[in-house]
Amino acid sequence: MLRLRLKFLLQNKQTRLILLLTLCLSLLITAIGLFSYSRYRQELDSELNTPNIELLQINLDVTNRAFRESDNKAVDASFQPDVLEYIRQGANADPALVSRVQQYLHTVSAGRDIQSIDIIRFDDHSLISSTAGYHTWQNAPDRTWTGWIEHIHNKPLLIERRWQGTDREQGETELLSLSRPVRTGNQVTGAVLVNLDYDRFFSNFYIHLSSSQYVYDLDGRLIYPKLDRSVPAAGMQKVLDELGVQPYAYVQLNGQSYMANQTFSDVTGWRLVSLVPTEQLLKNVKLARNMMLLLSLISILIGCAAIYSYSYAAFRPLRRINRLLHPEDPDSRQSLYDLEPVIGKLVGDFHSKALVAERSLPELRIKYVQDVLHRSIGPQEMNSKWEQYFQDWQPGPLLILIISIDRYDTWAASYSESDRMLLKYALHNMMAEILEPHWRTAGITGEQDRLIWMVQPRLAQDHDERRIQLHQDLQRMMTIASEHLRLSLSAGVGSEMMHISEAPLSYQQADTALSRRLYQGYGQILEYDHASSPESAASQNDPPLPDDHWRRELLQCVEQGDADTALIWLRRWCTAAREQESSPSTIRLLIHRSLEQLVEMAAQQHLSLPPEMANYHQHLLSTMNLDDIEELITRTLIHLTGQMDIRRDSREHLLVERIKQYMLEHLSDNIGLPDVAEYVQLSVSSVSMLFKEQTGSTIYDYLTRLRLDRACELLRHSNLKIADIAAQVGYQNENSFIRTFRKHKSITPGKYREQG
């Protein structure tokens, strides 16, 4: 109806003229209004944004200059020789060295903005502060940085806002801390922490009375201001989202319009944002825009009214004809204006019914084939629906094809669910297009990796010709899928059948043929062969595979951390499977049981699995060949045995640490190897061998070294007699202590004290 009405109106010169003038005038007014508004807004934006951007740039230069100065001091400190020497020595550092480092830090931190400078050591969790001297992390008067300082291992520069003191939530003074790593070789072994006074740092900011300024770090945390916020945090998050990376934008917050500007620091990564309320700045320009649009709308309404008035008079004769056709329906006389609906309704009903039937036929065929393959319908219903749904098919040979995606789980992991559905849909359409010239087809979706097709040849060909044609079409389909969809496919082909009732058997044969992918690999067209079926293979009386025995040996090797022996058993079993070519389903079942036992053992032992085994299920094996399955089990075995080795080594390490602690606590006692063995409840030979393997030193040498180190410390920092020091480090005889000291230090204790 609408099409006929428009056709009639556009054929009339008067109507065309009214419509043309209305559209041209409306478009002209609208274009002028929008252009004027756009130009005015551009000029206004430029005038309003320039001072705000300049103010942000000034503040940005202030912060960058301050941080460059602090960063230069941090970098210089990280390469200062005394600092590097302290990082290397740690707790063994000479007090004089610590004093020199602290004096250096005190000199460097003598700036106006710098509160303090700390040298932090990671190995023993110690530090030297320009204000507090040497401390451990736990005893440092200022240690709120301990929660994030470890990130310096991954970042060359850290800038954090924190409280001074021990309480991370509230402290004495708020600081801005800049951290640089200190490296020994290729390892980050320490850090330089430059602490700036927060209030003094931001006192250099230039603030405009009509604008609010905010500073955010790389993680979106608010740096400035800390108290007075004219806009709440939720509102500022909305501002940041709308700004994105734009230099400015207009935002609405709580009914108030703001002009937001921002700039970014290439030194600190900070984001400086300013907000200026626009208030009445844009009132006049919006009024001008609205008036232009209103004028355009009025012109359109006038033109539409003129067209409607003319069309009402032009269609009056047609309305009279419709009243004559529907005298019994007064509503029809009031709502119909032409004869088109009368004929259109009849044609439309017929077309819709035909369209529904045509579109439903593929779905009905899919449901029918599924019911036949699953034996869900009886013979009578099967035959009647076959004649109803497949009227264009001929009596003759049918066969079932199964198309499967190789390594389906690996392929599926590369795509989202929607992308997988799209690719399968494309594969389905591509295969239908390739088979269509030579075959009648009915395709259904099987399991996740499968497409199932029932096909019938269109041409009268013998069995060999049909087989060759099918191979050519399938090979073409696999090539195109590999080139365009990046899919590796395998196909299983069942035997030909003369009646639809034989479809379940052909489907089982196609599935059996496809299972030989385990031995023959990917991208193959596998036809069912009675000689290779599981039943005939079983009749050959092949020697049984080493089922339970090899699995028990495999698990025992994993528990012992013996990867080499486990891999030997795996390769031996896989070689036997390839040589015998046993039933693929039996092989996959044995492998599945083995992998389940490995997964269960990993859960019991609290071991992690490799990524490809994190979501293991039995269907994973159905689309893999034996080489890939062997590789999967190999990676799993290596992964698990490696963890078992680490766990065993870890227990021995803990035992050695206990021995070291025992000797340290009993330095003043006359202890020896038997006492240590009795303490850990092991034999003397076992303790000696274990300690030698883990430390490379004997227990006697290690104990002597501990005693002499303690003696050196007492000689330097106490006034005790040599005999008293010898007694405190476990030597009952002073002469024995002196001989041992001179043997290892090449100097007597007395001269060592004089030199210290």
Image (cartoon, grey):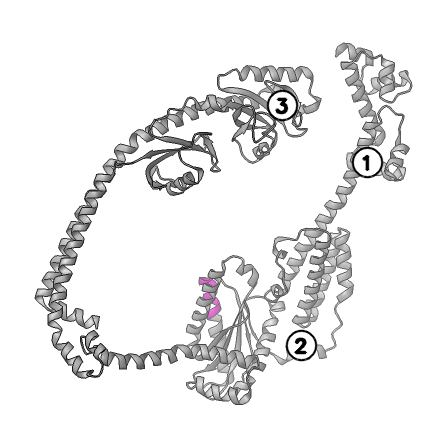
Foreground disc of the pair 2, 3: 3
Instruction: Report the disc number at residue 534.
Output: 2
**Point 29% across, 31% down: residue:** 50
The amino acid pointed to by label 2 is Pro
Instruction: Identify the residue shown where x is 54% and y is 58%.
Output: 413
Q: Name which residue lies at 43% across and 22% down.
A: 203
Q: Which residue is mark 1?
A: 691
Question: Compared with residue 730, is residue 547 higher up or lower down, i.e. above or below?
Answer: below
Whether 633 is drawn above or below 72: the answer is below
Please state which amino acid type lies under the numbered disc 1. Phe
Q: Position of residue 299 (x, y in %)?
A: 14, 55
Left or right side of 629 for 225: left
Tell how many labels: 3
Q: Position of residue 420 (x, y in %)?
A: 49, 62
Residues at marks 2 and 1 touching, judged by CB atoms closer than 8 Å: no
- Comparing 128 with 477, the one in front is 128
Q: Find numbered disc 3 in the image and state the secondary structure of the residue it sits on.
A: loop
Q: Please state the horizontal and vertical placement of residue 285, each as a whole percent of the image.
A: 21, 40
| Residue segment shown in magenta | 476-485
